[in-house]
């Protein structure tokens, strides 16, 4: 099973979860997701997700200077984003528990 | 240096954005602009973090664009739009490969080569300056003092001095950095190059490279002066020679050379073409082969001895 396809469905939640730890910028979020185990997540996917979350009002952005180049665009979670993360977390847990149950049942 | 690097980075990012734009062509303009802006932002941020070619860092433009537009919630590109960009994609791949090869292999190789060749150039520049001071002497090989390899001893000594000066100038120990050193380098280099060009032109003329002889009427191959050289050497006519060349059956033309250096060639309406001889430097028209023989005998052979009947050559003995 291609985990990339699975991740696509929950990338919003993953990005929001990353931002819950603190404001961050695109490349740092990509790095955190890869370090967490999603090695194959693409920059375009994460930035595209950030763009969509910003359009939805789930995250807000601001610029801050960077030592390594041009200003970075930092993203922070909005109250709406926090709500979306909460809902997403519940949905994921329910989904994961269901899958866990099904797989355990098959093994018996 | 830093500004140049930033400019090069910006150009790479611009190029990458341009390669992505066709993959958004089917979307509405505001979305297209927004996605292109995103591409620029993403690539700039990643390049700032990792430094490298955008395609190496974030993937090929088509895959990256497709991923970005999907993540942003837009439908995948229509097939026609993608097809239309395949040629551009291939072009960008080739251009990228060439650029990477040039920057990672060719340029460093050239830099190393130039650095290693610099001492050789310094020596050549010293010789060139010495040549420039006495080109005529070098060319003639005649001097009051003894000669070595056809070169005057004094000239060799002067050349050695100039070589040493040129090397020291190149190493930076002759003059401190500044306008005096720059003028010395530029002036000596220009002088040396001029001398080399002069000598090369002279040699070219001496060996007849580029000399053309053509005939009206039946085509006859032009004689090779390299062959003339062999011919003269074999027959030990070092001070000058009459050379009959061309097709042995027809014997249509005649060359006269002196010290392997024809001074002029010409083609006229007459039956044969005669090359000027040494300082006499005359060009004659002749109407018949006998006239050629007479002319050569009257005008030149008194100085150079009798014509030898060369069995492999053409003319005199025909």
Image (cartoon, coloured by chain):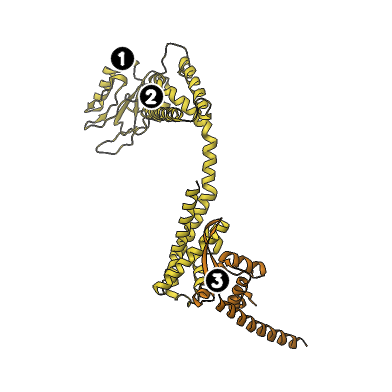
Chain colours: A orange, B yellow
Q: Are marks 1 and 2 on the same chain?
A: yes
- The residue depicted at 45 percent of the width and 66 percent of the height is B37
Is B203 positioned to the left or the right of A29 in the image? Answer: left
- The residue depicted at 52 percent of the width and 23 percent of the height is B164
Is B269 positioned to the left or the right of A34 in the image? Answer: left
Residue B109 location in percent, x, y? 54, 44
Mark 2 secondary-structure assignment: loop
The image shows residue B82, relative to residue B108, as above or below, that is: below
- The residue depicted at 47 percent of the width and 61 percent of the height is B16
Name the subunit of mark 3.
Answer: A
In-front residue for pair A74/B64: A74
Q: Do labels 3 and 1 share a chain?
A: no
Q: Which disc, if any, is residue A30?
A: none
Instruction: Point out the image quarter for the C terminus of chain B.
Output: top left
Q: Which disc, if any, is residue B260?
A: 2
Residue B256 location in percent, x, y? 32, 24
First in sequence: mark 1 vs mark 2:
2
1 or 2: mark nearer the eye = 2
The image shows residue B171, relative to residue A61, as above or below, that is: above
In-front residue for pair A44/B259: A44
- Residue at the spot of label 3: A45
The image shows residue A53, relative to residue B18, as above or below, that is: below
Residue B55 location in percent, x, y? 52, 61
Q: Are marks 3 and 2 on the same chain?
A: no
Q: Which disc, if any, is residue B302?
A: 1
Name the outermost residue toward the top.
B144
Residue A31 visible: yes
């Amino acid at each position: 099973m291609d985990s990339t396809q699975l991740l696509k469905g929950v990338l919003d939640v993953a990005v929001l979860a990353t931002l819950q730890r603190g404001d961050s910028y695109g490349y740092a979020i990509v790095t955190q997701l890869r370090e967490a185990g999603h090695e194959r997540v693409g920059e375009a996917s994460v930035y595209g997700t950030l763009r969509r979350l910003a359009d939805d009002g789930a995250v807000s952005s601001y610029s801050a200077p960077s030592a390594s180049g041009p200003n970075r665009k930092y993203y922070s979670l909005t109250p709406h984003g926090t709500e979306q993360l909460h809902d997403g977390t519940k949905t994921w847990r329910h989904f994961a528990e269901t899958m866990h149950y099904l797989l355990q049942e098959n093994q018996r | 240096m830093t500004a140049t690097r930033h400019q090069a980075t910006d150009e790479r990012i611009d190029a990458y954005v341009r390669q992505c734009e066709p993959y958004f062509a089917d979307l509405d303009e505001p979305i297209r602009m927004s996605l292109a802006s995103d591409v620029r932002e993403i690539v700039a941020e990643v390049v700032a973090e990792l430094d490298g070619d955008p395609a190496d860092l974030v993937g090929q433009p088509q895959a990256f664009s497709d991923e970005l537009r999907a993540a942003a919630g837009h439908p995948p590109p229509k097939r026609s739009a993608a097809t239309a960009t395949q040629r551009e994609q291939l072009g960008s791949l080739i251009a990228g490969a060439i650029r990477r090869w040039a920057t990672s292999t060719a340029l460093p190789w050239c830099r190393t080569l130039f650095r290693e060749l610099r001492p050789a150039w310094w020596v050549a520049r010293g010789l060139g300056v010495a040549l420039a001071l006495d080109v005529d002497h070098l060319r003639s090989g005649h001097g009051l003092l003894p000669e070595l390899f056809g070169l005057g001893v004094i000239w060799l000594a002067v050349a050695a001095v100039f070589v040493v000066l040129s090397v020291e100038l190149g190493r930076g120990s002759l003059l401190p950095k500044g306008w005096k050193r720059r003028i010395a380098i530029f002036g000596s280099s220009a002088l040396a190059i001029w001398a080399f060009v002069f000598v090369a032109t002279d040699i070219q003329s001496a060996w007849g490279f580029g000399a053309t002889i053509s005939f009206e009427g039946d085509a006859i191959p032009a004689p090779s002066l390299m062959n003339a050289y062999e011919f003269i050497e074999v027959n030990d006519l070092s001070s000058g020679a009459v050379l009959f060349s061309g097709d042995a059956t027809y014997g249509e033309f005649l060359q006269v050379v002196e010290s392997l250096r024809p001074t002029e060639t010409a083609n006229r309406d007459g039956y044969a073409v005669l090359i000027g001889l040494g300082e006499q430097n005359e060009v004659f028209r002749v109407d018949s082969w006998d006239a050629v023989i007479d002319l050569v005998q009257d005008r030149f052979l008194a100085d150079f001895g009798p014509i030898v009947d060369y069995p492999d050559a053409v003319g005199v003995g025909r």
